[in-house]
Image (cartoon, rainbow, N blue to C red):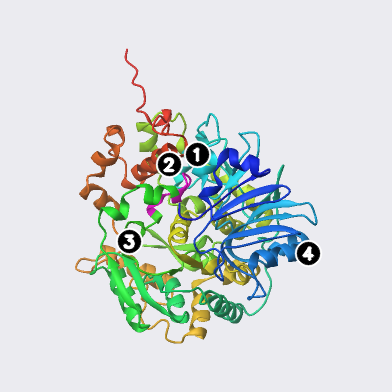
Amino acid sequence: MNRELFGVFGGIETFDRFRSSDEFDEVLAGSTITVGIRDSDLGTHGWSARYAGDDGYCVVWGEVYVPDETSNAARWLLERYETNGRDALSELNGSYVAVLDSAATGEAFVATDAVRSRECFYTDDPGVRVFGTDPAEVSRPVADPTLHRDGILEFLHLGVTLGEKMAVTELRRLPIDSLLTAGSVDSLERFVYRPQEFDYVAELAERLERALRRRAALPGEKGVLLSAGYDSRIILSQVSGIDHSYTVGSPDAQEVQGAKRLAEQYDASHTAFSPDERYLRPDESKIQYSQGIKESLHIHHAGYTDEIDVDTMYHGLLCDTFFRGHFTAQETVDVLGKRVPMSRLDPDPDPVESLLEKFGYSREASLDLTERTSFDVDPESFVREAIDAEFDARGERAQTVQNTLTCVGIANQPSIPFHNHLSDQFLTSFLATDRELVDWHLRTPPEYRTTETFLEACKRLDGDVLRHRPPDRPYDTMLFNEIERFARRKTPFLSSFQPPWPDRQTLFERHDFDRRLLSDAEHVHELPARHKLRLVDLREWLECCTDSRGRSIPWLSPPQTTIG
């Protein structure tokens, strides 16, 4: 990977057992932790920073902002920690992993941002705690890695491995809102729901404006990954200097045409990348960013990176989750036999059912997968128990069912590989993780975290932001949009709304991926393309992190046939 943070709880001699210092731009050794950082943009304002002095050292890897915008963020955190302790992390803003070794207090730790948008992985297997941002590198010291059956099953059936599990048992990742010490994993209280009454629209508008202003300072040529939806357009509207926009899709697709109109509205060039084999192909340009716990297909743009000519990239990832209630359960109404969501919260949702739907679980595909492999497990019972356990694990942070649903979604966000890849290639802004916006999310009751609230806030920043509506959302009301969607599907001579992303199954078949990717596994060829891509993701990532032992996954062999 282009950017990496890797460290050990120990001195430089311990560090040198696992990695060469020559692999990193900086290696810092303190009384407890030695860490190496590789990042060509180290020291750029709003990006990775490091500081070392008599009082210890600090490294912040990723996107980072501090209250004193002129300060070195790493120095600011170390100095603020010495007066405020761990509470200093609550003031750090961005999408990051921080390492701090304080000579003044004798404490040393590794921490992620409050929502774990940049993950940190660790293992104790070599007899010392090793950690880092690339799980393949962290796993290399593991002498005899064993496959984590539940982690693998969750990934194959849900597309995401829940909680802190990985595909390898000896490898773990920091939980949401936590920090790692030499002998513990400590929970923090930066991400706890505390609903209050205030002017939700006005506060969101003001905080969006400040968050976008902070991120507008990132340097160089600027671009945005632009959809025809709501989230990326407010970035294009408010960040001056975005000259380039990019969308994956056929030039005549509704999504591409909508994005092109937005680009023209805000005087940016627009490039559409036609979907070909690069869109789906799960190779090393994608697999290392999915980390064996999430699907690489979320990295829509990966195959086209060489054609993207910018220094800084913006995106609207997770705005729907933080501001528009993607994971909240909506009340539905029956329309001609179809359950259509309304703009009201379900007063008594089934948490497991709701989360299975949000994660895109397919009972039929999972049953088919089980029948074609050697997993001796009932997939329906397994996924329900896994989701139920994860829901219970997040309850203390949320208290109510609706907030817990969202907390589970944020803690296990399937689309994070999208940001992982971008931030390894470009200076990458992650608007939704802004500390002020996360605070708005935690203080706003779920019934007000809606598309209507978000759009009203956006219109206060730009009254013309909805000049071009998303092609599949012609109305302000969710119910009306769903009714038209249903009517278009059922009425002859009316074209249906097109999905925003290219069709996976068509591309999988067009480019003969059964033969090219799964020639040794004909027993799975009849599975849906999405599940076959998960199998390839898993095998390729395990090859990377377990020295080519990934293909010998016993459960992926055909089931034994009993004769007699």
Q: Which mark is residue 306?
A: 3
Relative to 111, say whether 167 is above or below: above
First-in-chain label (2 vs 4): 4
Determine which residue is flagged by label 4: 84
Q: Secondary structure at mark 1?
A: loop
Give coordinates of residue 223: x percent, y percent.
40, 72
Q: Nearer the viewer, residue 432 or 426?
A: 426
Between the C-alphas of marks 1 and 3, the distance is: 30 Å
Give coordinates of residue 107: x percent, y percent.
76, 52
Give coordinates of residue 69: x percent, y percent.
63, 75
**Pointer 2 and pointer 3: residues touching (CB < 8 Å)?**
no
**Pointer 1 and pointer 4: residues touching (CB < 8 Å)?**
no
**Pointer 1 and pointer 2: residues touching (CB < 8 Å)?**
yes
Q: Nearer the viewer, mark 1 or mark 4?
A: 4
Residue at (52% x, 85% y) in the render: 460
Determine which residue is flagged by label 2: 541
Instruction: Residue type at mark 2: give it.
Output: Trp
Between the C-alphas of marks 1 and 4, the distance is: 37 Å
Q: Is residue 112 visible to the viewer in this orientation of the structure? A: yes
Q: What residue range appears in magenta?
A: 289-297
Relative to 484, say whether 553 is above or below: above
Between the C-alphas of marks 3 and 4, the distance is: 44 Å
Residue at (51% x, 77% y) in the render: 216
Relative to 179, say whether 229 is above or below: below
Q: Secondary structure at mark 3?
A: helix
Say left or right for 483 vs 455.
Answer: left
Q: Secondary structure at mark 2?
A: helix
Q: Nearer the viewer, mark 2 or mark 3?
A: 3
Say left or right for 270 vs 548.
Answer: left
Q: Which mark is residue 167?
A: 1
First-in-chain label (1 vs 2): 1
